[in-house]
Amino acid sequence: MDQYNFQFKKQYGQNFIKEDNIVTKIVSIADIPAQSLIIEIGPGSGMLTKKLAETGNTVLCYEIDNRLEEILSRELGSYSNVHIIFDDFLNRNLMEDLKDFSYEHLFVVANLPYYITTPIIMRIIESQIFVDKIVVMVQKEVGDRFSAQPNSRDYSSLTVYLNYYFTIKKEFIVSRNSFVPKPNVDSIVISLTKKEQLLSVLDLSFFFQFVRDAFHFKRKNLRNNLKNYNLSLLEAGLKTIHKDLTSRAEQLSIEEFVQLSNYYCQNKK
């Protein structure tokens, strides 16, 4: 970006990847088949965008910074399969944006701004655009939280939420030295692959609210976090998974949360 004398804006979380081998590896991990539409959030200098375009698939980019319009036009002008929307991804109607494209598979591949990683992932899921696979570079501690296991410090309601929909895998660490400007932390590339068979949940909205409530205060047990629920009913349900009200949310697997949620829904009056 030196030749453009571009001034990076901290408010947009702009840390552009500068190593070609890393973007090549990201695209390889994505393993994108023909007849796919690829969404990229925050193309930045267009380095990853070029590699995605070279798969022969259509690439739809969202870029919040209008100052990059001229730069991306120069860098990507020769790729007729790249389309860029200069707007905040979080403000878009994704179903509306995608209706003009014909595709068989949908992928999200991006180097996400650290400060809005979780809202972006949540927006993708909640928009019900049915993504086959998400491959994103995120702050390392965020990747740890997404892929955490029960009984670990990083395990949270977000972990349960994401793992309900996706199989999550840590792919590789990316040093902070691989970016310009250099961030204060290292990054990690993670993949989220759509699960073909979802766990059977009786009431999905109740399930996710129940999980959020269970994790409300990280160090408190279920009795304290779920005191607004029917504790007698919860205690009976917990016995079926060999837990009790003194257990903490981080001790329950996603399967156990599903079983407990379903038990509560089936037996509440």
Image (cartoon, rainbow, N blue to C red):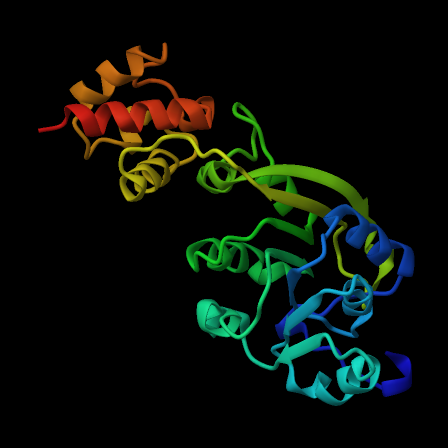
227 with respect to 100 (left or right)? left
Q: Residue at x 76, y 82 (%)?
A: 72
Task: Establish if 50 lies above or below 108.
Answer: below
Task: Establish if 19 lies above or below 256.
Answer: below
Task: Establish if 25 lies above or below 97.
Answer: above
Residue 112 appears in the figure: no
Question: Could you say which quadrant of the image residue 248 lies in?
Answer: top left
23 with respect to 120 (left or right)? right
Q: Quadrant of the N terminus?
A: bottom right
Towards the viewer: 245 or 55: 55
32 with respect to 107 (left or right)? right
Q: Residue at x 49, y 41 (%)?
A: 165
Q: Residue at x 80, y 84 (%)?
A: 77
Residue 123 appears in the figure: yes
Q: Position of residue 13 (x, y in %)?
A: 66, 68
Q: How many marks?
A: 0
Q: Which residue is situated farthest in the bottom direction here? A: 70
20 with respect to 63 (left or right)? right
Towards the viewer: 228 or 37: 37
Q: Position of residue 222 (x, y in %)?
A: 32, 26
Q: Position of residue 177 (x, y in %)?
A: 87, 57
Q: Which residue is situated farthest in the left direction here? A: 269
Q: Quadrant of the C terminus?
A: top left
Q: Position of residue 143 (x, y in %)?
A: 64, 44
Task: Establish if 150 lies above or below 26.
Answer: above
Q: Residue at x 43, y 24 (%)?
A: 255
Question: Could you say which quadrant of the image residue 36 lies in?
Answer: bottom right
